[in-house]
Amino acid sequence: MNVPVLLPTQARDETFGGVTYHIEGELVPVLHIELSSEKIYFEHNILLWKDLSVEISIMPVPGALKRMLAGMPVFVTQAGGPGRIAFSRDGAGHVLAIHMQRGDAIDVREHQFLAATNGIGYSFARVKGAASMFFGGTGFFIDTFKCQSDAGVLWLQGYGNVFEVDLAAGEQIDVEPGAWLYKSQTVKMETIFQKLSTGIFASGGNLFWNRFTGPGKLGFQSMSVMLATE
């Protein structure tokens, strides 16, 4: 298996999917986007600043009732240009851009989406059972983004730094449950348990992790999301 690699932490004058963007800063990075004809949507609480010419509106999220019952956001905010807009989340981390072509789809851990161009569709699914035990047994959501236009950009923020590994078919890697950030839809995820019992410490507890099986890309963050949100 290839060794996971650190993704770039900065970007300058990157143009893709109808927008130009910049990622700057070290501890709490900022995403700047230059808008023309292409609109974007984003989490409503991450706006840092914008030009007066940028218009803001509300875009409902499919399945709003299910998200409301789970305490999740039920809408995202849309921005249209021309003009510039910038975003920042209240936490140290690593902002990254994922370039997508028509038909590409990616699964993302909840609450780590920043923004996306309008041609990228947004849906979600709730994870129940053993895989959700680290969230009080109530389950958690995985957001799915699928590119419905010729090209689009998805921006995420990870805690700490973000690494990526490209798994071949059948290749596997074990990741701390709070550390995975995104994965190709072709990558399968399962929860693995190992009971610790030896000698007088026969009830020493359990180890658990998420096991991912390729093919596809897997991104993970160096700081567990459970630690970052305490």
Image (spheres, rainbow, N blue to C red):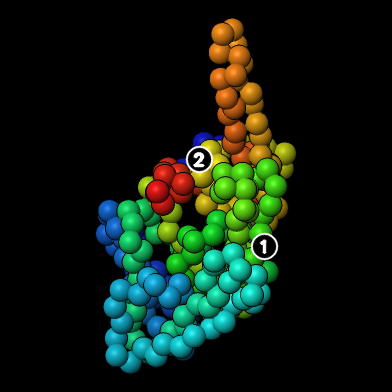
- Specify the quadrant of the image occupied by residue 224: top left
Kindly identify which residue carries mark 2. 4
- Specify the quadrant of the image occupied by residue 157: bottom left
Residue 180 drawn at (x, y percent): 53, 47
Q: Is residue 135 left or right of residue 16?
A: right
Q: Is residue 157 left or right of residue 139?
A: left
Residue 116 versus residue 8 in the image, above or below: below
Q: Residues within 10 Å of mark 2 (few under 14, many from 20)?
A: some
Q: Nearer the viewer, residue 34 or 108?
A: 108
Residue at image location 60% in from the left, 19% down from the top: 203
Q: Residue flagged by tag 2: what amino acid is it?
A: Pro
- Specify the quadrant of the image occupied by residue 118: bottom right
Q: Residue furthest right?
A: 170
Q: Residue flagged by tag 1: what amino acid is it?
A: Ala
State the CA–CA distance, disc 2 to disc 1: 27 Å
Residue 9 versus residue 82 in the image, above or below: above
Kindly identify which residue carries mark 1. 125
Residue 64 drawn at (x, y percent): 62, 76
Instruction: Confirm whether residue 183 shows in the render.
Output: yes
**Quadrant occupied by the N terminus:** top right
Q: Is residue 204 left or right of residue 19?
A: right
Q: Is residue 158 left or right of residue 28?
A: right
Residue at image location 46% in from the left, 74% down from the top: 42
Residue at image location 38% in from the left, 54% down from the top: 94
